[in-house]
Image: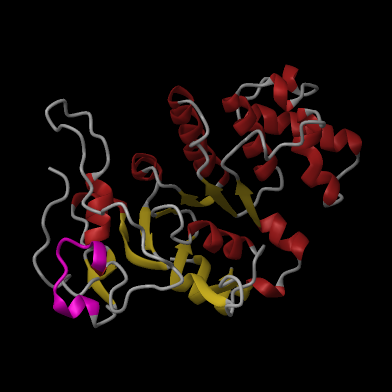
Amino acid sequence: MTMLLEARDVYRSFQVSGGLLRPRRTLFAVNGVSLSVAKGEVLGLVGESGCGKSTLARMLLGALEPSRGDIRFAGRPLAAADRLERARRIQPIFQDPYSSLNPRKTIAAIIGLPLLVHGVGDAAERRRRVTEQMDLVGLPRRHADSYPSQLSGGQRQRVAIARALILRPELVIADEPTSALDVSVQSQILNLLLDLRDELGLTYILISHNLAVVEHLATRVAVMYLGRIVEERDTDNLFAQARHPYSRALLSSVLTPDPFAGMPEAPLGLAFPNPLDPPSGCAFHPRCPAAVADCSRTRPTPVAVDGGFAECLRCAEPAAATRH
């Protein structure tokens, strides 16, 4: 299996003000993450807000340098590629399709901007490729001279997708690509992303807090908590039998179509731990219903489980089914 992207023990820290007359403190937004993405797969990256997903995504895009660690793309250090090369090969799709589009530019100008920046073709060639791209994402050609404010949310996201793919990148990092859309439109965009993956041979990293979206789209899932990946497994295995207590809590909070299941309950409590003062041992132990004494003293290391790994001292115990 050919690995397209690899991150090896990546850290990203920020200096945060400690307040009046107090020294600055170090916040580790990403705290020793290793992951790899094979060509053609869809890696879902999930976790609560503030866990470090977006910071990690910015590093994988090359928009933010790691404090420590190594990121390689197609076998080469990502930092060795210049900005234009990274943009040709890795593209983002953002959460809000309105704020990510220039309201003063026409749809054709927005989609064709990467071609102009990279000096691809003349005006006629760029216009032809923009038209082809609009057809590819299901956007009527009559909207070429429209402005973002004249389109619906779903149409604007199609514009964002068309712009991201016009240079035919190898990797697309989609950060909550459907969360700003109506539920009725979300499935259309998700199915479009799947179709484009098959047609163009794309590789995706999908960042989301919506586990239903991840289950629909991802081939593999990485669960992130307080800057670390605590479980990474094949999608089917993780959703059938999550092994980390945090993964199980996330899955238990998902609404299901079963009318007799009642409202979901996630035993996580209301307080997210302070990333400036993380707990000792396992970072999840203060919120974990299965924690034992060793969890507060010993930092867990990855343990091999079916279809991947989990960072939990109790992973050696028999797994309980998550879904029935």
Q: Residue at x 80, y 42 (%)?
A: 113
Is residue 237 in view from this perspective?
A: no
Of residues 282 and 169, the one nearer the viewer is 282
Which image quarter holds the N terminus? Answer: bottom left
Q: Position of residue 144 (x, y in %)?
A: 77, 24
Instruction: Locate residue 38, reporting x and y percent.
Output: 46, 62
What residue occupies the far top of the structure in this picture?
A: 142
With respect to residue 176, does 133 lie above or below? above
Query: Does the stretch in magenta take in 274?
Result: no
Query: Which percent across, then down, holds residue 244?
Result: 23, 63
| Quarter of the rendering occupied by the C terminus | top left
- Horizontal arrangement in the rendering, residue 312 relative to residue 165 (left or right): left
The reply to whether residue 147 is visible in this rendering is yes
User: Is residue 253 shown left or right of residue 322?
Assistant: right
Q: Position of residue 286 (x, y in %)?
A: 25, 66
Magenta residues span 286-296
Q: Residue at x 24, y 73 (%)?
A: 304
Visual colour scheme: secondary structure
User: Residue lying farthest left?
Assistant: 318
Residue that appears at 48% across and 54% down: 40
- Snapshot quadrant of residue 143: top right
Picture quadrant where residue 152 is located:
top right
| Residue at the far front in the pictured view | 21
When the figure is inspected, residue 214 is found, relative to residue 20, above or below; the finding is: above
